[in-house]
């Protein structure tokens, strides 16, 4: 069998040209299409994987939320209960304070009203006692009571020191003395009074008896700048004032307490 070299060379050249042509016009486009399809497939696979991961993440999030719902619900319920309990306690405390304040006000008002009523009753009792004493004294023998009180008034003047007696007479001679009597006395009773006062002052005394039934029983020695009183009117007024002052002081002490 005879092989021609040029023929073999030409066939080789043709084969190479065919390979070049196939590579250029067929193989590269096919490879490009394959690569493009592989890229698209990879892209789709990546997107599917991303979607799967997103779905998995969403599923896990939903699962976590579903798991956290009871705990959040319990927390909200506990918070609401605590707030309700705190509000209830605050309302109860406010009501207690208001009730205590109202009770204190009522007690104070009742105490004031009771003190006022008691004071009014005691004043009425003092007035009634004074009126009864006045009636009894007016029914008593006026002469005996007047002489006794006149003796006390003279003794009070005699008990003064020299400066005090000098202030009474004010340098006037004879010493003017106005003798106010609840009931008239005989001169036999007033003369000793004049003598006692003259002895006490060391100078004559001009005694002027004057009757004043409002004294109830007793006397008043009126000097130039002073008065010496010894009467049941004065005694009853002082007793009544002392009684009401003592009661008022006692009520004030109770109110402060």
Image (spheres, rainbow, N blue to C red):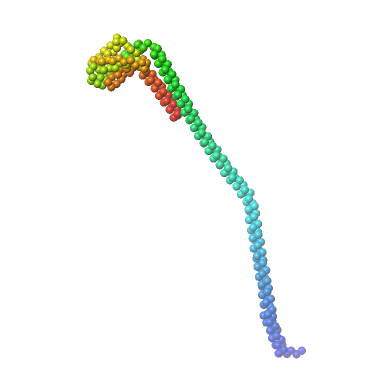
- Residue at image coords 30%, 20%: 227
**Residue farthest along the top direction in this orientation:** 188
Of 76 and 15, the residue lying toward us? 76
Residue 45 quadrant: bottom right
**Residue farthest along the right direction in this orientation:** 1
Residue 236 quadrant: top left
- Residue at image coords 27%, 15%: 207
Residue 255 visible in the picture = yes
Q: How many numbered dots are placed on residues in this image?
A: 0
Quadrant holding the N terminus: bottom right
- Image vertical order of residue 113 relative to residue 207, above or below: below
Residue 119 position in % (x across, y down) = 44, 24
- Residue at image coords 42%, 17%: 131
Give the side of residue 240 with respect to residue 190, left or right: right
- Residue at image coords 44%, 30%: 256
Residue 152 visible in the picture = no
Of 23 and 16, the residue lying toward us? 23
- Image vertical order of residue 33 relative to residue 233, above or below: below
Quadrant holding the C terminus: top left
Residue 229 position in % (x across, y down) = 33, 18
Give the side of residue 199 with respect to residue 137, left or right: left
Residue 231 quadrant: top left
Of 62 and 172, the residue lying toward us? 172
Residue 170 position in % (x across, y down) = 24, 21
């Amino acid at each position: 069998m005879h092989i021609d070299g040029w023929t073999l060379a030409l066939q080789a050249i043709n084969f190479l040209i065919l390979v070049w042509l196939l590579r250029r016009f067929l193989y590269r486009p096919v490879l490009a299409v394959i690569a493009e399809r592989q890229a698209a497939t990879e892209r789709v696979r990546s997107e599917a994987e991303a979607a799967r991961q997103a779905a998995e993440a969403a599923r896990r999030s939903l699962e976590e939320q579903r798991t956290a719902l009871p705990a959040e619900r319990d927390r909200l319920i506990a918070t609401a209960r605590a707030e309700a309990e705190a509000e209830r306690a605050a309302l109860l405390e406010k009501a207690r304070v208001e009730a205590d304040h109202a009770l204190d006000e009522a007690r104070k008002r009742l105490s004031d009203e009771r003190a006022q009523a008691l004071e009014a009753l005691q004043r009425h009792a003092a007035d009634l006692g004074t009126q009864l004493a006045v009636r009894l004294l007016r029914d008593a023998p006026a002469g005996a009571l007047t002489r006794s009180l006149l003796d006390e008034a003279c003794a009070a003047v005699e008990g003064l020191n020299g400066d005090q007696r000098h202030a009474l007479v004010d340098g006037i001679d004879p010493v003017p003395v106005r003798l106010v009597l609840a009931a008239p006395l005989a001169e036999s009773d007033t003369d000793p009074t004049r003598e006692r006062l003259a002895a006490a002052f060391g100078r004559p005394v001009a005694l002027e008896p004057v009757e004043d039934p409002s004294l109830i029983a007793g006397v008043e020695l009126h000097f130039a700048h002073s008065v010496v009183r010894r009467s049941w009117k004065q005694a009853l007024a002082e007793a009544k004032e002392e009684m009401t002052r003592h009661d008022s002081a006692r009520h004030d002490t109770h109110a402060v307490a």
